[in-house]
Image: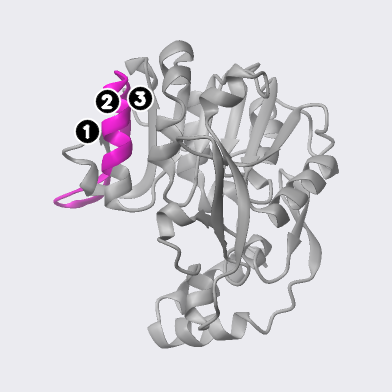
Amino acid sequence: MRRALRTITDSLRKDPTVRSVARRAVWLIPDLPWTVRIPDVGPLRIRLRRNRYLFWEHPLVNDWLMMSAFERMIRPGDVVYDIGGAIGLYTRVLSHWFGPLRVVTIEPMSANVQQIRRNVALGGLLERVTVLHMAAADREGYEDLQIDDIMSGTAVLDRVTGGRASHGRQHLGLPPKVERVRVRTIDGIIADGTAPPPAFIKIDTEGAEGDVLRGARRTIDQHRPRLAIALHGDDKARDCAAVLAGHGYHVAGWVSTPGSPRVYAAITPDNVGALADNNIIASADPADVATEPPRLTSAPRRGPRPPGS
């Protein structure tokens, strides 16, 4: 069933007319709370409209590059940061599959934070996960957050959008939906004891990745965490590559080359524009990124078993 839905969805996404109609049709889907059961993860609480993709997507299929990176970069007993936690799917995957000592999940959107807490409880992970309602950035304070409650259930800081409405709301001609959110640096939450230092950090912040890194300069220099970053645009990719190079980090990812759509290679500020995929990995140890992570084809079992497994 999941495979059939994915095939249909992928084909429809290629048609511009269908995409336009579909965006408007999405508005008609009631955004009711629902529980789906994801193989190897267990029950996950979602919202029907904004999280509908979780009816057919699976991390090993749709996010296999990032899952393979996690397998390479995470050690059992690590403290892991999930920055940009969404509704907690990655938090659950990180906890159940890779065996960290603790996951610190950072998410700015209040509705998502509620979902994360429900999903942490559903996974039996209350003693292993810390949820922080904040945005990670390069300064301390408060900022406005643009909410996409239509298409994706994501949120973006105004510094990234320039105050424009989220894509989902723009497509329907709706005004911005804004939340005021606490903004903190990774250096700050470690210095005041809010969270322990990380051994591994995953970052997916809809365009604020460079600011997250700048707010973690002391952490990067002192603790040398391994990193997996989802990038959002060539300018953001160059920014992240430059920041990491300044810390002496080795960066790798998948680039396009003549005759090949995707080749694993070292990433520098000069070639980051050739990225074929928006994911990069980085480490102070060149051995961590020297070779392409083998594709992860089955879920590891290093953490607490998912409910019902």
* First of labels 3, 2 by sequence position: 2
Which residue is identified by label 1?
268
Which residue does the image show at 38% across and 39% down from the upper left? 210
| Quadrant occupied by the C terminus | top right
Which residue does the image show at 53% across and 35% down from the upper left? 140
Q: Are marks 2 and 1 in contact (CB under 8 Å)?
A: yes
Which mark is drawn over residue 289? Answer: 3
Residue 99 located left or right of residue 120: left
Considering every residue shown, the one lying at the far top of the view is 222
Query: Nearest the camera: 47 or 296?
Result: 47
Asked where in the image residue 163 lies, by quadrant, the reply is bottom left
The residue carrying pointer 3 sits among few (fewer than 14), some (14 to 19) or many (20 or more) residues within 10 Å by Cα, namely: many
Instruction: State the separation of the CA atoms marked 3 and 2.
Output: 14 Å
Which mark is drawn over residue 245? Answer: 2
Is residue 77 placed above or below 211 in the rendered structure? above
At label 2, which amino acid type do we have?
Ala
Query: Is residue 254 at least partly visible in the picture?
Result: no
| Quadrant occupied by the N terminus | bottom right
At label 3, which amino acid type do we have?
Val
Which residue does the image show at 27% across and 49% down from the upper left? 235
Q: Which residues are drawn in magenta? A: 238-263
At label 1, which amino acid type do we have?
Thr
Is residue 163 placed above or below 16 in the rendered structure? above
Is residue 179 placed above or below 273 in the rendered structure? below
Asked where in the image residue 279 lies, by quadrant, the reply is top left
Which percent across, then down, holds residue 112? Answer: 69, 53
Q: Give the foreground label among 3 and 2.
A: 2
Secondary structure category for the residue under label 1: loop
Q: Give the foreground label among 3 and 1.
A: 1
